[in-house]
C-alpha cells in the first residue's frame, strides 16, 4: 500500500465545525496546518450527512469564523439547499492558504514518546493510502476523542455522581450512560397527494399511543432531534446497531404519519433520512480544569476565558425514543458563561489540544457546551492558542495558558470573537488618531465591545455618504483596516430549514449590514466593496498616509442607516 508522510506545525484530527475552525484559525495566522477528516465532506453534524442545526447561545449569536460561515450561507444559499451549505464548508478549508486537507482519512494510530505525540497515521479510503503526519501540536476535534485511547490521554465517559463536583443535576450514583445519537428525517410538501410504502423492516406504530409523547408537528422548524437512541449502550462501540434501530424508528414514524390516522400530511413526501447518526456525547478528554454545573449556571467569567456558551442545560434521557417520559431536561441560563483555555488541552499529553463536544467538562456541563456554534468557538480558540504557542516557542500546551492566555484572548477578540468579560485592546494607530465623523458619534467606533450590549455606546450610526476619518499629525505606515458591521446578532440563528413547505423560504444577508463602502488614504480610494455580506472585514493596506477614511456607499433596501461597531487602523 502507498504511504505518504507530511510534516506540519499543527495537525487537526476531525473536520466538524470545531476542527474546521481550529484549522482555519491557525492557517490564517500563518501556521502550517493539516486537517485529517474521516468523512468525504467537512462540517460533521452540521453537514448534509447528519443535518443538525448549528445552535449556540440564544439571543447572543457567536461571531468570528462561525458567523462568517453563517453569513456566507445567507448570501449564497438563497433557497436553502444542503449541497450549497456543504460547498461553503468545503471551500473554507480546501482552498485556505497554509492548510492541507485529507478527507476520507480515518486516524488509526499514533506514535508517542515521553508524554508527547510525534505523529498520527490515517488510512485514506479513496486513494488506498496511509498518511503519516508529524507535527509539533495536535488537536483532537473528532467528537469521539479518537486520539485519547491512541495516545493514553486521560478521558472520562458517562455521568458523574452528585458528590464529585457538588452538582445538583448529577446522578446519585455515577454510571456509563450518555446522551444518545439521532438519525433525523426531512420531508417535503407537494401540491398533490403522495403515498408511502414502508420497508418491511420498519417498526409499525398503529396509533398515537404506541409512540412516546413528543412534539410531532410538521413545519420547517421540526428537525426530529428526539429520534434518539444509544445513551444506555456504548455510544461508540454500538453505533452500527443503534443506527439500524434508529432507521427502523424513522421509517416507522413516517409510515405512521402517512398510513395510520389523519395527520394532515396527505401531500407530504419523505425527502431524506440520515444514515449517519449525529452524536451528542461519548469520550470527554480531561484538561487542567473540568467545567461543571455551578460555573455554567452562575455565568462564571474565567481569567483565561477563550470562548463562551449559553445553550440551556439540555440533558437527554439515555433511553431516548424508548423512554415514554420527558425526552430531556431543559434549564434556560440567565446569562452566558465563559470556557477557560484550561479546558481545551490534555492534562497528561503535553502537545494535545481538543475542541468540540469532547472538551474537559462534566456530563451536566456538556449538556450545554456540546452545541455546534459553541464548538466552533472552541475550535477557533484552539487554533489561535497553537499559533501563540509556536510564536512564543512553547512546546507544551500548558505553557500557553500559564504564560500568554491574555494574548490568545486579544487575538480572538481582534478576529471578531466575543468573550464575555474581556475587553479588546485597540491598536496604537486607532488610539492615537483623531477620529471625526461627518455625522453621528464616531468615538463609539473605539468604545466598548463590537456588538450591541446593554449600557454600551459602541456603534456609529451611519447613512449613505457618511464618513469616519482618522487623522494623524504626520503620515503613518498603514498595514490594514479592520471593520465590524451590524449583522443583527438577535436574528433567527438557524443555518438551514428542516422541512420544505410549498411556500418555501428565502435566505438573504441581514438587512442591518452595510452593503457597500470604500476606504480612502489621504482622500484617495484604495479599496472598494460593492456587495458586502459579511459582518467582519480585514482589508490589507500598503499606504503611507496622514488620514484614513471609511465611507458608507450602500445600505439594504429600505434602510436609512446602519451601525458600524469597529473601524481599526493598524
Image: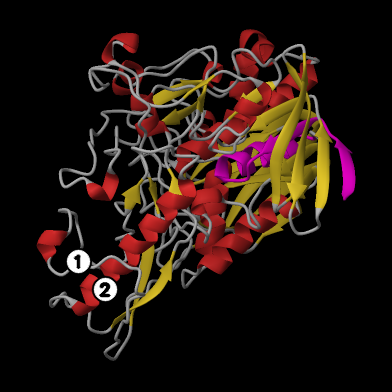
Q: Residue at x 26, y 73 (%)?
A: 255
Decide if residue 432 is in sight here.
no
Considering depth in this image, is 369 or 98 the residue closer to the camera? 369
Compared to residue 424, the image places residue 84 above or below, namely: below
In this rendered view, identify the residue nearer to me: 52 or 200. 200
Say whether residue 369 is left or right of residue 171: right
Give the residue furthest to the front. Answer: 200
Looking at the image, tell me whether mark 1 or mark 2 is earlier in sequence order: 1
CA–CA distance in space, label 1 to label 2: 8 Å
Q: Nearer the viewer, residue 462 or 50?
A: 50
- State the quadrant of the C terminus: top right
Q: Which residue is mark 2?
A: 255
- Residue 216 vs 469, above or below: the answer is below
Considering depth in this image, is 89 or 563 the residue closer to the camera? 89
Q: Which residues are magenta?
A: 1-30
Q: Residues at badges 1 and 2 in contact (C-beta under 8 Å)?
A: yes
Q: Residue furthest bottom?
A: 192
Measuring 37% from the left and 18% from the top, which residue is drawn there?
A: 292
Give the crowd class for mark 2: few <14, some 14-19, many >=20 residues within 10 Å: many
63 with respect to 414 (left or right): left
Residue 483: image location, x then y, percent: 60, 42
Tell me, yes or no, if residue 204 can be seen here. Answer: yes
The residue identified by callout 1 is 205
**Residue 485 at what x, y percent from top left?**
52, 47
Q: How many marks?
A: 2
Task: State the SS at label 2.
Answer: helix
Amino acid at each position: 500500500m502507498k504511504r505518504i508522510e507530511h510534516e506540519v506545525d499543527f495537525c487537526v484530527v476531525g473536520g466538524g465545525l470545531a476542527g474546521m475552525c481550529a484549522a482555519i484559525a491557525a492557517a490564517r495566522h500563518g501556521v502550517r496546518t493539516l486537517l485529517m477528516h474521516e468523512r468525504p465532506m467537512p462540517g460533521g453534524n452540521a453537514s448534509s450527512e447528519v443535518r443538525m442545526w448549528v445552535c449556540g447561545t440564544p439571543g447572543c449569536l457567536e461571531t468570528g469564523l462561525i458567523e462568517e460561515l453563517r453569513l456566507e450561507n445567507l448570501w449564497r444559499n438563497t433557497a436553502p439547499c444542503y449541497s450549497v451549505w456543504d460547498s461553503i464548508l468545503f471551500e473554507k478549508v480546501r482552498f485556505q492558504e497554509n492548510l492541507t486537507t485529507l478527507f476520507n482519512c480515518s486516524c488509526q494510530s499514533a506514535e508517542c514518546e515521553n508524554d508527547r505525540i510525534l505523529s498520527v497515521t490515517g488510512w485514506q479510503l479513496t486513494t488506498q493510502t496511509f498518511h503519516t503526519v508529524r507535527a509539533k501540536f495536535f488537536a483532537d476535534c473528532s467528537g469521539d476523542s479518537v486520539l485519547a485511547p491512541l495516545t493514553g490521554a486521560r478521558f472520562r465517559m458517562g455521568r458523574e455522581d452528585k458528590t464529585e463536583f457538588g452538582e445538583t443535576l448529577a446522578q446519585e450514583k455515577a454510571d456509563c450512560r450518555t446522551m444518545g445519537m439521532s438519525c433525523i428525517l426531512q420531508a417535503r410538501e407537494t401540491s398533490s397527494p403522495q403515498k408511502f410504502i414502508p420497508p418491511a423492516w420498519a417498526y409499525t406504530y398503529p396509533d398515537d399511543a404506541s409512540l412516546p409523547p413528543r412534539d410531532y408537528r410538521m413545519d420547517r422548524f421540526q428537525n426530529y432531534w428526539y429520534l434518539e437512541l444509544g445513551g444506555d449502550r456504548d455510544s461508540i462501540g454500538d453505533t452500527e446497531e443503534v443506527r439500524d434501530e434508529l432507521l427502523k424508528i424513522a421509517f416507522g414514524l413516517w409510515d405512521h404519519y402517512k398510513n395510520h390516522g389523519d395527520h394532515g400530511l396527505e401531500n407530504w413526501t419523505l425527502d431524506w433520512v440520515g444514515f449517519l447518526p449525529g452524536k451528542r456525547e461519548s469520550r470527554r478528554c480531561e484538561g487542567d480544569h473540568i467545567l461543571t454545573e455551578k460555573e455554567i449556571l452562575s455565568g462564571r467569567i474565567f481569567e483565561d476565558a477563550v470562548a463562551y456558551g449559553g445553550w440551556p442545560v439540555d440533558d437527554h434521557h439515555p433511553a431516548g425514543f424508548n423512554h415514554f417520559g420527558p425526552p430531556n431536561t431543559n434549564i434556560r441560563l440567565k446569562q452566558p458563561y465563559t470556557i477557560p483555555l484550561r479546558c481545551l488541552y490534555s492534562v497528561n499529553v503535553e502537545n494535545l489540544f481538543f475542541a468540540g463536544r469532547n472538551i474537559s467538562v462534566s456530563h451536566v456541563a456538556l449538556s450545554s457546551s456540546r452545541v455546534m456554534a459553541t464548538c466552533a468557538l472552541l475550535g477557533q480558540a484552539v487554533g489561535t492558542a497553537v499559533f501563540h504557542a509556536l510564536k512564543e516557542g512553547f512546546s507544551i500546551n500548558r505553557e500557553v495558558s500559564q504564560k500568554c492566555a491574555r494574548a490568545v484572548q486579544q487575538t480572538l477578540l481582534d478576529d471578531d470573537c466575543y468573550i464575555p468579560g474581556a475587553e479588546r485592546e485597540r491598536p496604537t494607530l486607532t488610539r492615537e488618531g483623531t477620529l471625526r465623523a461627518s455625522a453621528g458619534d464616531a468615538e463609539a467606533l473605539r468604545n466598548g465591545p463590537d456588538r450591541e450590549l446593554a449600557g454600551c455606546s459602541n456603534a456609529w450610526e451611519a447613512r449613505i455618504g457618511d464618513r469616519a476619518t482618522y487623522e494623524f499629525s504626520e503620515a503613518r505606515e498603514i498595514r490594514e483596516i479592520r471593520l465590524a458591521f451590524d449583522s443583527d446578532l438577535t436574528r433567527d440563528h438557524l443555518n438551514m430549514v428542516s422541512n420544505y413547505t410549498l411556500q418555501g423560504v428565502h435566505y438573504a444577508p441581514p438587512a442591518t449590514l452595510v452593503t457597500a463602502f470604500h476606504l480612502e488614504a489621504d482622500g484617495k480610494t484604495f479599496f472598494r466593496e460593492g456587495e458586502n455580506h459579511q459582518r467582519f472585514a480585514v482589508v490589507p493596506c500598503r499606504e503611507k498616509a496622514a488620514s484614513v477614511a471609511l465611507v458608507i456607499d450602500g445600505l439594504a433596501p429600505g434602510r436609512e442607516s446602519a451601525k458600524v461597531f469597529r473601524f481599526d487602523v493598524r
